[in-house]
Image (spheres, coloured by chain):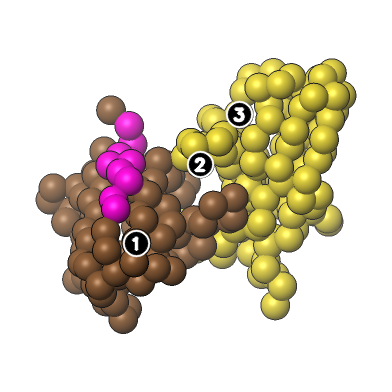
Amino acid sequence: RKEVEQDPGPFNVPEGATVAFNCTYSNSASQSFFWYRQDCRKEPKLLMSVYSSGNEDGRFTAQLNRASQYISLLIRDSKLSDSATYLCVVNTGGSYIPTFGRGTSLIVHP
Amino acid sequence: NAGVMQNPRHLVRRRGQEARLRCSPMKGHSHVYWYRQLPEEGLKFMVYLQKENIIDESGMPKERFSAEFPKEGPSILRIQQVVRGDSAAYFCASSLPTGGTTEAFFGQGTRLTVV
């Protein structure tokens, strides 16, 4: 079982749609959780941290379920500019190394 | 505060040559991570370093690859005797020394092409 798993997609949605991504992790001792965004041939950029209480930043909401070992990202009112790959990241292992899922591709079309 | 700086951005090497990739972390960051990304693939962890120490190199190939983060200067990822399969984007990230609870910030990457 991979340490961090994501559905690669692609998720193809119209502008204005709401879309949700899930990510599961295998190590129950994982420390911290993040969502990053990666545009084609660019570096990953932090989108938001994920807290146990959940957190919201504008159109983006992240949730953590430690019991079931998954995190989620909800994007409301999708924009064309949201088209990217969304990477789930878990700081895991004895050294809490940022470990990446393969990413979920989102395509928002007019 | 400059972000994570990687150079060169693009590097072309012939098979059998050496490749040296450099990474200067963000100011105040003492933790450096190197990742490799093949086309259409996710980021694969290679090595985690702190100043003058390799903390975890579980993702490094056993041969030809080495990494260092000296007391002064950038972190270096070195690939000896490159082969076509080494062609990839190599990303460096840095973070604060807070025990794995903080986010990592990435450089723009070095795209290595082996011809």
Q: Residue at x 55, y 31 (%)?
A: B59
SS assignment at label 1? strand
Q: Mark 3 sits on what residue? A: B60
Nearest to the eye among marks 1 and 2: give it: 1
| Residue A96 in sight in this render | no
> What is the x, y in percent for residue A35?
37, 59
B53 with respect to B7 (left or right): left
Q: Quadrant of the C terminus of chain A?
A: bottom left
Three-letter code for the amino acid on which mark 2 is drawn? Leu
Label 2 is found on which chain of the structure?
B
Who's brown, chain-wise? A
A46 or A69, which is in the foreground? Answer: A46
**Would you say B73 lies left or right of B84 here?**
right
Check disc 1 and give the amino acid type.
His
Q: Residue at x 40, y 41 (%)?
A: A102
Outermost residue to the left: A67
Observer able to see residue B111? yes
Chain letter, yellow in picture:
B
Asked whether, in this view, residue A45 is left or right of residue A25, the answer is: right
For the residues labelled 3 and 2, the Cα–Cα distance comes to 13 Å
* Secondary-structure class at tag 3: loop
